[in-house]
Structure formats: structure tokens, C-alpha cells
Image: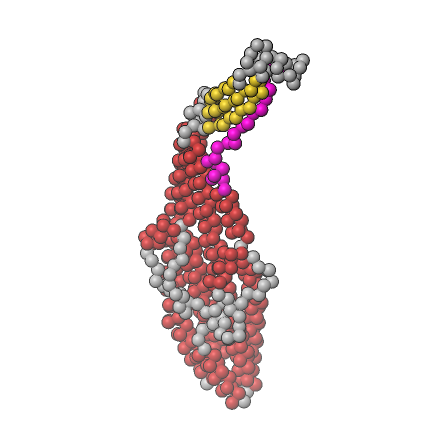
Amino acid sequence: MYVRHTSAIFFILALLAVRPARAAEHNHVQTENLNRLVASALTGNPELKASASRWEMFKNRVKQAGSLEDPMLMLKIQNGVVTDPLNFTRDSMTQKVIGISQQLPYFGKRALREEVASREAEAQHFAHAERRLEITRMVKETYYQLGSVDHELYLLDKNIQIMETFITLAQTKYSVGQGAQQDIFKAQLERSKMLDMRISLEQQRKSLGIALNAILFRASDTPVGEIPEYGIDGTLPSAQELMATAEENRPALKGLAAQLLKGKGSYALAQKEYYPDFNVAFEYMQRQPAMGSDGSDMYSLGVTFNLPVHRERREAMLAESNSEIAMTIEETNATRNSISSGIADLLAQMERRSKLVELYKNGIIPQAQQSLESATIGYRVNKVDFLTLLDNRVTLYNYEHQYYDSMADYQMKKAQLEALIGKELSGSEKP
């Protein structure tokens, strides 16, 4: 019995010596690659495809906006005699007419219409780029959430195994009269609680896998491999540097800049509406000799134009363009403010998580491991009761869980920061 007791103690110490959890530590386990997942999402996601098609749709409107209207061809019989409609020699004024006319907008209108359509297409291009950032962020967040669940599942499996050893220890001590039956029940309860947590985590992982498959436009039951171990890189640019990066790269800001230019183009086009559009027409009239006339052919050339006298409509167009410009300027200010505050908040949260990871890795977890090892040895020689031993094990598990939870949260915040500034941050992810 003593040999069994001693073997269990050494088994626990061996488990404690294992480096904190790794999600996929066996070569045969399928693992996921983040870069490939992101590439797959950017290629196959239907929302992105729809966004790209919308951009193409607006690009094809540019040439339409700058094109002339089709010319009008006119064929007619003029001054025909009703009583003899097909006799063209009865009256010298009867004519067979062919004519052509072309609508011509006032100088500069076509170019302005094309510019407005071009800026609108440009804004759609940046909206598509913004959606790509969002899809990338969603993939990364789901990936690291899966990683956190995988790490916790590993921790649970390791601790369930240790709890089973604790139950054996408690049963061994109870059988020789050195322990209480309550210790056995307490260890069994802790193991059952962990099994309950495992069921919840397995369901959570399935839900995250379904969400990831939806982003990647894969079948919902496509297996999602385990997430390999990752770490954090605590070196980040300053808030000022990140804001400068956002000004240079964030599609939302570029889209608003294009929208502002569109508004200015619309304003200039509205000013042009105070000037008339023209219609140039040419007609050729063929005649037959009749009633002493030699039947000489004739032509007509004319220009018609509208009279822009309804100023209320044109003033409303100017006011609409002014409102669009003012709205875009304020939206740009609001977006910059949101980016700036978002950068500051995310940096603060990432700094906190980075410090916690360092603290757990080099301080709390090693100390908790030492405390558990000491409690295990003390329990062996009856200097520590079973509840103290159990409490030390649960405490270590909680710290290990918080360690990996902090790493996952750091990486998710990093993904949010990259989406916020419009550029991927360099730096390796070191465990």
C-alpha cells in the first residue's frame, strides 16, 4: 500500500513538471494555420464577393456618367397633301426630310458627372477594403477564442487525470485509517465539476467552429483542427505612431476622403445647373419639281437650349451638396476620434494583458506549482490535510487558465487594433 501511495505522489510531481498546456502537442493532431484561414476567408466569403461586385457595379457607372446621350435620327414627310399623301410633285412645299440632333450639356458638366461617379466608385472600393479588414479581424478573433478553449480543454484533461490520482490517494489513506471519507467525496466532486466544465467547453468549441466555417463559407460540419500554441510579442508602437498608420492605411478614412471629393464635385455640378444645356439639330429636305418650282433641296440648322429659370430647384441642389460636404467632414472627425480613442483603449488593455502574462508565467504559476509540490509532499507525511492539497491544485489550474486566457485576449485585442489602423502589426508570436 505504501508503494502505491508513493507512486501516486511521484506521478503527481511528474505532471506538475510538465510545461503549461499546449493545445496540440502530438504530431498526428491536425492543426490550423491562421494565415491560411485568413486567405481562405478573403477568397471565399460571400459578403466580400458581394462587396467586390458592388464596387465593380459603381466602376461601370463612371463611363456612363461622362457619356453623351445618343443622337436622335429623324425621318419625316413635311407638308404632304392629305388628299394625295404619296404624291411628292403636286405641291412644291412637299419635302422628304432626314435630320439628326444631339443633346450637349453645358461645358464642364460631363467631366463633373464623371468625377462624381468616379469618387463614388472609389468610396465603394474603400468600403470593400474595410470589409476585408472586418473579415480578417473576425477570423483572427475566432481563431484565438478556439485557441483559448483548446488550452483550457488540455488543462482540464490534465487536471481530471490529477483528480483521479487524488481520489486514489484519498482512498488509499482512508483504507489505512489516515484519511477521511469526506476527502474522497470532495475529490470526486471536483472531478465531476471539471467534467461538467469539459462538456460546456466542447459545446463552446463546436459553436466557434461553426462560426469559423461560416466566415470561411465552408460546410458547418467541416472539422476544425486544434490551434497550435502561441504567445505574445509585447512590443507595440506608440499611440501617435499607430494613429499616423491609421491616417495612411485605414480604408474608412480614405473612403470618407473620396466621399468628400464627391460632395465637392456635386456642388460644382450644381453650380453648372444655372447654365443651359444645348440641342444641336441638322435637317436635310429633299423636294421634287412642282408648280413651276425647280424642286431645289433645302436644309435647316438650329440650336435649342433650356432656360434655367427655376432657381428654387437649383438652390436646393446646392444646399444638398453643402449638407453632404458638412456631413462627410463631421463623419471624418468622428471616425478619427473613434480610431484615436480605440487605439488608446486597446493599448491599455493589451499592456495589462502583457503584464499579466509575464506575471503568471514567471511569478504566479511557478510559485503556485511550488506551493502544490510542497502541499503534495506535506500530504504524504500527514503534515497537510487533503483540502489544502486540493485547494492548491484548483488554484494552480485557475492561474494556468488565466494565463492562457490573457494570451488569447491579448491576441484578440491585437486583431482589433490591426483592423482599427488598417494594417497588420509586425512581430512574431512567441510562446
Q: Is residue 211 magenta?
A: no
Establish if 403 lies above or below 324: below
Q: Nearer the viewer, residue 31 or 290?
A: 290
Q: Is residue 81 visible?
A: yes
Residue at 51% in and 89% down: 3
Q: Residue 420: horizontal and vertical position, in percent? A: 41, 52
Please tell me which residue is depicted at 52% across the width and 31% down the height of the picture: 70
226 to 116, vertically: above or below: below
Give x and y (percent) for residue 371. Answer: 42, 76
> Does residue 188 sit above or below 317 in this rendering?
below
Q: Quadrant of the C terminus?
A: bottom left
Region rendered in magenta: 60-80
Q: Residue at x 57, y 85 (%)?
A: 175
**Quick one: 131 or 106, which is closer to the camera?**
106
In the rendered image, residue 167, in percent from the top left (x then y), is placed at: 55, 79
Figure quadrant of residue 108: top left
The answer to whether residue 152 is visible is no
Say which residue appears at 53% left-offset and 72% top-offset.
29
Q: Nearer the viewer, residue 393 or 94?
A: 94
Query: In which quadrant of the rendered image does the N terminus lie?
Result: bottom right
Residue 61 forms part of the magenta stretch: yes
